[in-house]
Image (spheres, rainbow, N blue to C red):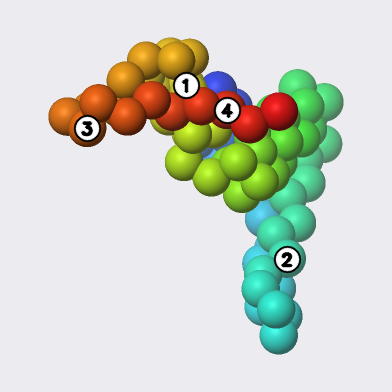
Amino acid sequence: MSQSLPTLCRNAGDYRRQLTLTPTGVIAEETSDDPALTDAIRAHAREVTGFVRDAMPAMMHGVMGPGRPAIATGHRWVRQA
């Protein structure tokens, strides 16, 4: 679960987002004149990078807590080092 996304949603009118489609994906540029929002944008970028790098275990870490069993499967999410 993202820790920065609620801040970005609450302040959606106070920053700008530009999406650019490329042959290999999307470039998202987010900017703000508010230093606190700039910090939240950077924090969110780090979170998204972690989700992409570590996939579902990174996201579930925030939802279920570290080392807790996955719902109804008996498997454990393990964050890779």
Disc 4 element: loop
User: Between disc 4 and disc 1, whose residue precedes?
Assistant: 1
- Per the model, the C-alpha gap separating discs 1 and 3 is 18 Å
Query: Which image quarter is the C terminus in?
Result: top right
Please give left or right for residue 8 compared with residue 17 in the image: left
Residue type at the position of mark 2: Ile
User: Between disc 3 and disc 2, whose residue precedes?
Assistant: 2
User: Between disc 1 and disc 3, whose residue precedes?
Assistant: 1
Please give the count of numbered marks on the rendered protein.
4
In the displayed structure, 5 sits above or below 21; it is: above
Residue type at the position of mark 1: Gly
Q: Position of residue 51 (x, y in %)?
A: 58, 42
- Per the model, the C-alpha gap separating discs 2 and 4 is 27 Å
- Per the model, the C-alpha gap separating discs 3 and 2 is 36 Å
What number is the disc on residue 73? 3
Q: Nearer the viewer, mark 2 or mark 4?
A: 4
User: Which residue corresponds to the image point at 66% horizontal and 46% vertical from the top-left?
Assistant: 53
- Per the model, the C-alpha gap separating discs 2 and 1 is 26 Å
What number is the disc on residue 62? 1
Disc 2 element: strand
Mark 4 crowd level (few <14, some 14–19, many ≥20, 10 Å Cα): some
* Residue pointed to by mark 4: 79
In the displayed structure, 6 sits above or below 68; it is: below
Residue furthest out toward the bottom: 23
Residue type at the position of mark 4: Arg
- Per the model, the C-alpha gap separating discs 3 and 4 is 17 Å
